[in-house]
Image (cartoon, helix red, strand yellow):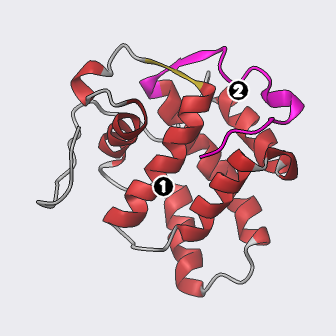
């Protein structure tokens, strides 16, 4: 992905550091907050896709979500799960892991149902000035992550893997 100049509120992109758990909270809170905005902006979604989005934002992808978050970190940082417990992530890394989490879920559970969301997140990243509303929701998710946990994180969860899937 190409990194471009971020909106003014994103100037501190790499300064603050978050634990793996708080990064997960930021991601899940952001996705929950984004659902209403996405639903309005992606009006051409089929009913099945809309249901998948609603499920995605409401339950944040199911029973293996913590393990999927660990895998997203592995794919971005190349740090195995057992070495992630004391890891600190920059806001930039949390955002990239959020995209990767959506891609992992998109492949594992409902193939293609999150394509619009993934495309939107990637566009937020490459062309941030056109996504001020979404970035304000991201900032709210960061603020809320200090007091709210949308979906509890578990270090005990492991992905059940198909033979072709790599696991951190």
Name the quadrant containing residue 66.
Answer: top left
Numbered mark located on residue 143 in the image: 2
**Which x, y percent locates residue 11?**
80, 24
Is the residue marked by circle 1 packed among few (<14), some (14-19), or many (20+) residues within 10 Å? many
Numbered mark located on residue 30 in the image: none
- The tally of labels here is 2
To which residue does mark 1 refer?
102
**Which x, y percent locates residue 123?**
70, 55
Magenta stretch, main secondary structure class? loop
| Residue at point 34%, 35% (across, down) | 74
Q: Is residue 44 left or right of residue 1?
A: right
Please state which of residues 1 and 154 is positioned toward the viewer in this rendering: 1
Instruction: Look at the image and say whether residue 9 sits in the magenta stretch.
Output: yes
**Which x, y percent locates residue 17?**
57, 16
Name the quadrant containing residue 140.
Answer: top right
- The segment highlighted magenta reads 1-21
Q: Earlier in the sequence, mark 2 or mark 1?
A: 1
SS at badge 2: helix
């Amino acid at each position: 992905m190409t990194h471009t100049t971020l909106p003014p509120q994103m100037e501190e992109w790499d300064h603050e550091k978050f634990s793996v758990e708080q990064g997960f909270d930021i991601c899940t809170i952001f996705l929950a907050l984004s659902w209403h905005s996405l639903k309005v902006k992606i009006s051409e979604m089929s009913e099945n896709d809309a249901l998948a989005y609603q499920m995605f934002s409401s339950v944040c992808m199911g029973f293996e979500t913590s393990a999927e978050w660990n895998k997203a970190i592995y794919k971005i940082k190349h740090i195995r799960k057992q070495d992630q417990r004391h890891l600190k992530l920059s806001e930039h890394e949390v955002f990239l892991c959020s995209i990767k989490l959506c891609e992992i879920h998109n492949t594992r559970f409902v193939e293609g149902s999150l394509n619009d969301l993934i495309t939107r997140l990637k566009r937020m990243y490459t062309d941030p000035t056109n996504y001020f509303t979404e970035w304000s929701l991201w900032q709210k998710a960061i603020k809320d992550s200090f007091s709210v946990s949308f979906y509890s994180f578990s270090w005990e969860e492991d992905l059940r893997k198909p033979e072709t899937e790599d696991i951190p």
